[in-house]
Image: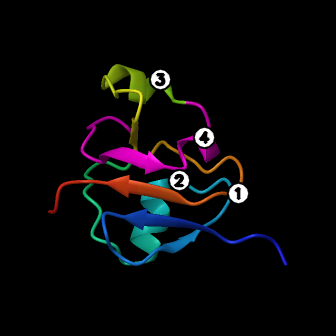
Amino acid sequence: MPPVSTITLNDLPPAPLQRGQDLLGAMLDAGLPAMYLCMAGSCGRCRCRVSAGLEALAPRTSAEDFHGCEDDQRLACQARLDVDGDVHVHQPPR
């Protein structure tokens, strides 16, 4: 059986996250209250702080650079799971 990776938003229960899946998609699939607007990297609304699992994510995209994401920040619609691992993100409540 393949390893199960998870994403945790704030202090909510973890949700499944598959390799190649973007963080926003995983959170929305699980019914988590993630902040977002465009789902394409153009608005920056889904910016989140990654407190664990940053090394499991694919490299930063040009959209994340454009929005000035700090080293521990990613756009949830752009950040994809690259290798198995658990990811913990924080966003302000909606």
Residue where numbered disc 3 is placed? 62
Give the spatial CA distance, label 1 vs label 3: 23 Å
Identify residue for label 4.
55
Q: Secondary structure at mark 4?
A: helix
Q: Which residue is mark 2?
A: 22
**Residue 40 position by quadrant:** top left
Tell which tag, 2 or 1, sits nearer the viewer. 1
| Tags 2 and 3 touching, CB below 8 Å | no
Check if mark 2's residue and mark 1's residue have beta carbons within 8 Å.
no
Marks 2 and 3, the one that precedes in the sequence? 2
**Amino acid under label 2?**
Asp
- The residue that disc 1 covers is 84
Q: Which residues lie in the magenta part?
A: 41-59
Q: Inspect the image, locate mark 3, and give the three-letter code of the amino acid beneath it.
A: Ser
Is 32 colored magenta in this rendering? no
Task: Tell me the CA gap for discs 4 and 3.
Answer: 18 Å
Q: Residue at x 39, y 41 (%)?
A: 75
Q: Are marks 4 and 3 in contact (CB under 8 Å)?
A: no
Q: What is the x, y in percent for residue 33?
A: 27, 70
Q: Residue 43: x percent and y percent?
A: 26, 38
